Image (cartoon, rainbow, N blue to C red):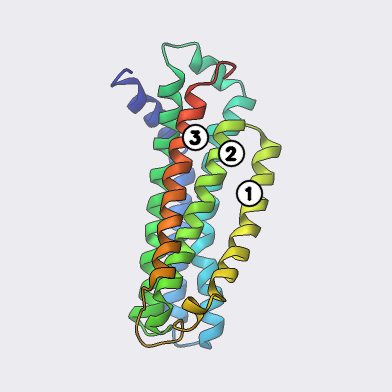
Amino acid sequence: MSISIVPQLVKKDLLLWRKMILIFGLANLIAIGILAMLYGRVPSWVFSNLGFSLLIIPGAACGMALLMQTNVFEKVKSTQPFIMSLPVTVKEFTLAKLLVNIPVFTAFWLVMISASFYFCFGLGLFPMGALPFMVMVFLGIFVAYTLILSVSILFQSLGITVIAIMFFEMGTPAYLWTVVYLNPISDYIYGSEAVWNSTALTIVTIQVLVVIFTVSATYFIQSRKRDFI
């Protein structure tokens, strides 16, 4: 594998969509600023629900928009066949797509976590007992994202990717609500201390492993396609 073509492919996508990424980044900072101004001025339950939406929407929207542009629409607009006519292997092309999308979303995801944990636990909005569940929530978001990204890379179909977005966006809250009702989780969620029992650690471990497996399997499967174009 060439050691130079992958960075060039990554740079190409980042340059093409840098304005979109910056706009969503600015929206994220504005959302945090709005929450900072609202804190203490609205009821806690209003702040929690509004804050969760404001912190997640910019990053999630950027992640979905970027994977659609770089994986789905690139094929629709026939840009992909042109790129593949160059001295680029399928492995290099696939790796470049992963290295564009995952780091950008991860940056937004880390901002989500940092701001959320500051408001929830730094300012005492939630009890510390909710910390393990909050970790599961944000890992759940990352799991859903990697699954959607995988679908967009493997199928490069607008319809299938949209269905995947709808399915995983609805499925993630469903399984998280199932988790919160498990006794080893619900018994401590309102406590004053974070309890990392075997159930909590198992769920977090599974989420991390799903992310690793999804990314690895996507690269493995896509790299071995013969009818890539």
Classify 10 Å Cα crowding around label 1: few (below 14), some (14-19), many (20 and above). many
The numbered disc on residue 218 is: 3
- Quarter of the view holding residue 130: bottom left
Marks 3 and 2 in Cβ contact (< 8 Å): no
Does any portion of residue 38 appear in the rendered image? Answer: yes
| Residue 142 % position (x, y) | 47, 54
Earlier along the polypeptide chain: callout 3 or callout 2?
A: 2
Q: Earlier in the sequence, mark 1 or mark 2?
A: 2
Type of amino acid at the residue the image marks with label 2: Val
The amino acid marked with disc number 1 is Ile
Percent x, y of residue 32: 43, 68
| Residue 139 drawn above or below residue 124 | above
Do labels 1 and 2 touch, CB within 8 Å? no
Q: Residues within 10 Å of mark 2 (few under 14, many from 20)?
A: many
Residue tagged 1: 165
Residue under the point 61% across and 20% down: 78
- Tell us which disc is closer to us: 1 or 3: 3
Three-letter amino acid code of the residue under disc 3 = Thr
For the point 54% across and 60% down, which residue is it?
Answer: 57
Q: Quadrant of the N terminus?
A: top left
In the picture, measured across the screen, residue 176 lies left or right of residue 34, that is: right
x, y percent for residue 163: 69, 45
Query: Callout 3: helix, strand or loop?
Result: helix
Query: Of the residues under marks 1 and 3, which one precedes in the sequence?
Result: 1
On the image, numbered disc 2 is attached to which residue?
151
